[in-house]
């Protein structure tokens, strides 16, 4: 989905800080909750977790660090999947706990492609808007690149991220010139992205 989490093409946020993060003891909690919810309890999958983080209200998203966003998204999923109620969550937290926005509708998994992409194919990332989860950042949509490798096939993110069934879909590593993505990018820099074939269209040679 399009949202404040997709910062790769946005302007005005300044340079990315490279300072080392001083980890607090509590920051292991989100990782443990993800392992419990997605692993042992099987209440949600990793794409649903990613979508939960995407659904955080923009002002809250910008005010939280990585681990706080992770915890907010996981708490939302624990309530949505019935592990605990919102009131129980706030009782345990000792105060108000804002929830993420509702889950998007998602898209059904596509049928298998009639022809697979090949190494060296020039492709364009489809310029699509998806109200639910999607594993393609906004800054790459409509941009052209080259298929350089077959990646391992994955479940279709747009489906499983919204709780819909999906088999595996063909997925490829696509190489983009950074200058194709950002006008002020350093010359010669390349960006490689893993994208399902459904997100791509082959261009004529």
Image (cartoon, rainbow, N blue to C red):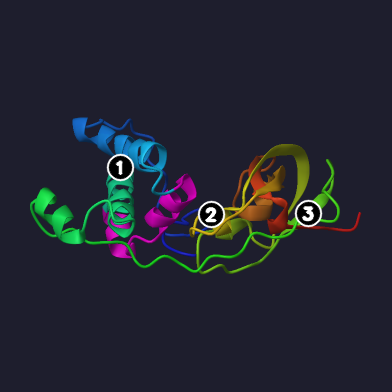
Q: State left or right for residue 47 relative to residue 94.
A: right
Quadrant assignment, res 80:
bottom left
Give the quarter of the figure containing the C terminus.
bottom right
Name the mark nearer the viewer: 2 or 3: 2
Quadrant assignment, res 186:
top right
Residue carrying label 3? 123
Chain part drawn in magenta = 45-63
- At a point 41% along the width and 61% down the height, the residue shown is 4
How far across and down, in percent of the image, does residue 184 sit?
A: 59, 52
Q: Is residue 56 magenta?
A: yes
Element class at badge 3: strand
Q: Nearer the viewer, residue 30 or 44?
A: 44
Q: State left or right for residue 115 relative to residue 126.
A: right
Q: CA distance from mark 3 to mark 1?
A: 35 Å
Mark 1 or mark 2: which comes first in sequence? 1
Q: Are marks 1 and 2 in contact (CB under 8 Å)?
A: no
Q: Is residue 119 magenta?
A: no
Count neighbours of disc 1 (C-alpha within 10 A) and say few if under 14, some if 14 to 19, many if 20 or more. some
Residue carrying label 2? 160
- At a point 75% along the width and 38% down the height, the residue shown is 150
How far across and down, in percent of the image, does residue 120 sit?
A: 84, 42
Mark 3 or mark 1: which comes first in sequence? 1
Q: Is residue 60 above or below residue 174?
A: below
Query: Principal SS element in the magenta part?
Result: helix
Residue carrying label 1? 67
Q: Is residue 1 above or below residue 170?
A: below
Name the mark nearer the viewer: 1 or 2: 2
Q: CA distance from mark 1 to mark 2?
A: 23 Å
How far across and down, in percent of the image, does residue 101 sit?
A: 34, 66
Element class at badge 1: helix
Q: State left or right for residue 38 relative to residue 93.
A: right
- At a point 57% along the width and 53% down the height, the residue shown is 157
């Amino acid at each position: 989905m399009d949202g404040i989490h997709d910062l790769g093409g946005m302007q005005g946020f300044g340079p990315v800080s490279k300072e080392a993060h001083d980890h607090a003891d509590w920051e292991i909690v989100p990782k443990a909750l993800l392992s419990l919810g997605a692993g042992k309890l099987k209440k949600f999958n990793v794409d649903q977790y990613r979508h939960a983080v995407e659904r955080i209200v923009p002002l809250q998203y910008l005010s939280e660090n990585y681990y706080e966003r992770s915890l907010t998204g996981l708490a939302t999923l624990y309530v949505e999947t019935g592990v605990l109620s919102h009131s129980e969550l706030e009782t345990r937290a000792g105060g108000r706990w804002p929830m993420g926005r509702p889950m998007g509708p998602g898209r059904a998994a596509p049928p298998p492609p009639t022809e697979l992409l090949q190494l060296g194919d020039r492709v364009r990332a489809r310029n699509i808007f998806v109200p639910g989860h999607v594993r393609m950042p906004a800054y790459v949509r409509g941009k052209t690149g080259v298929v350089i490798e077959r990646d391992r096939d994955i479940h279709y993110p747009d489906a499983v991220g919204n709780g819909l069934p999906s088999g595996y879909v063909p997925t490829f590593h696509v190489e983009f010139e950074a200058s194709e993505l950002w006008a002020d990018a350093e010359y010669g820099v390349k960006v490689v992205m893993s994208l399902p074939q459904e997100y791509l269209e082959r261009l004529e040679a």
